[in-house]
Image (spheres, helix red, strand yellow):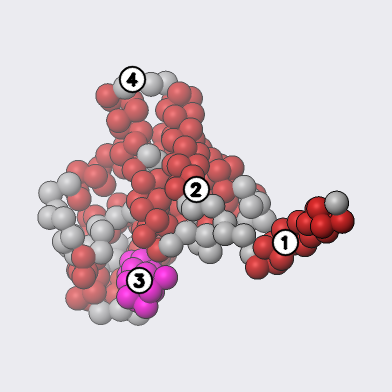
Amino acid sequence: MTRQSNERAGRSGQRRRTRGAIVAAAAQLLAKGANPSVAEIAEAAEVSRRTVYLYFPTLEQLFIDATLATIDATKTVEAALSEGDDDGDVEARVERMARAIQRNAVDTEQQGRALMRLTANRAPGDGANGVPPRGYRRVEWIERALAPLRAKLDAARFERLVSALAMIIGWEALIVQRDIRALTLDEAEDLSAWAARALVRATLEELPPDKPTRASHSTARNAKRPNDESRERR
């Protein structure tokens, strides 16, 4: 990974953490029955009011995202990911994640459609330094499921795989599956799980074969010597 790629990944991670802190602060205030202002949320998140507005142009959008954060989606997806924390089978890891996210997309479909309406008219890249208007939790879950591949993939391939997986899970995928393909809920979940596995497999198949090590070359040379000596004796 180049220094530029590292810096870009670091900035992206920091933006997600900032957005997560704002959402968490709003969720905590709402859970107490408050109707918090931007100033109160900014104070709780330890950011400026300007930062809150950069990530959430309207309080309505922030409140919807904060409400979603309190739904059991986080718990169930985290449980699915924790189940395979020590599992090196990345296909199995992403399938568990995809199934958990799709089940929760069904349970929160109406909230998801509302959130999409609120963000649909935003210009591409609009927001704080081009940070996406939503989806940071999904990206974090995907990156966690793909963690065993970080050392195997270059930065470009890893980020492309994250983006591809983000397209086939969540509310957007569910709407395509239901509204366009008329799939049942079970069929929709199976499709996302299959697509997640296929994307991981396709990415791994792109990698060049491992180069033989110096030791293997030495072993190969040594293996030839008895034959060479026998020919000399003949």
* Amino acid type, callout 4: Ala
Q: Which residue is depicted at the point 87% across and 56% down?
A: 233
Residue for badge 3: 5
* Above or below: residue 99 compared with residue 213: above
Foreground of the two, 41 or 13: 13
Residue 214 image offset from top left, x and y in percent = 65, 68
Q: Which residue is mark 4?
A: 182
Q: Secondary structure at mark 3?
A: helix
**Disc number lying in front (4 or 3):** 3
Residue designated by label 1: 221
Relative to 126, is 233 on the left or the right? right
Q: Which mark is residue 204?
A: 2
The reply to whether dot 3 and dot 2 touch (C-beta < 8 Å) is: no
The overriding secondary structure of the stretch rendered in magenta is helix
Q: Amino acid at mark 1?
A: Arg
User: Pointer 4: residues within 10 angstroms few (<14), some, or many (20+)?
Assistant: few
Measure the alpha-carbon separation of dots 3 and 1: 40 Å
Which residue: 49% across, 45% down?
205
Residue 27 location, quadrant: bottom left
How packed is label 3: few (under 14 Cα within 10 Å), some, or many (20 or more)?
few
Q: Is residue 31 above or below residue 84?
A: below
State which region is magenta. Answer: 1-20
Query: Does 221 lie within the magenta span?
Result: no
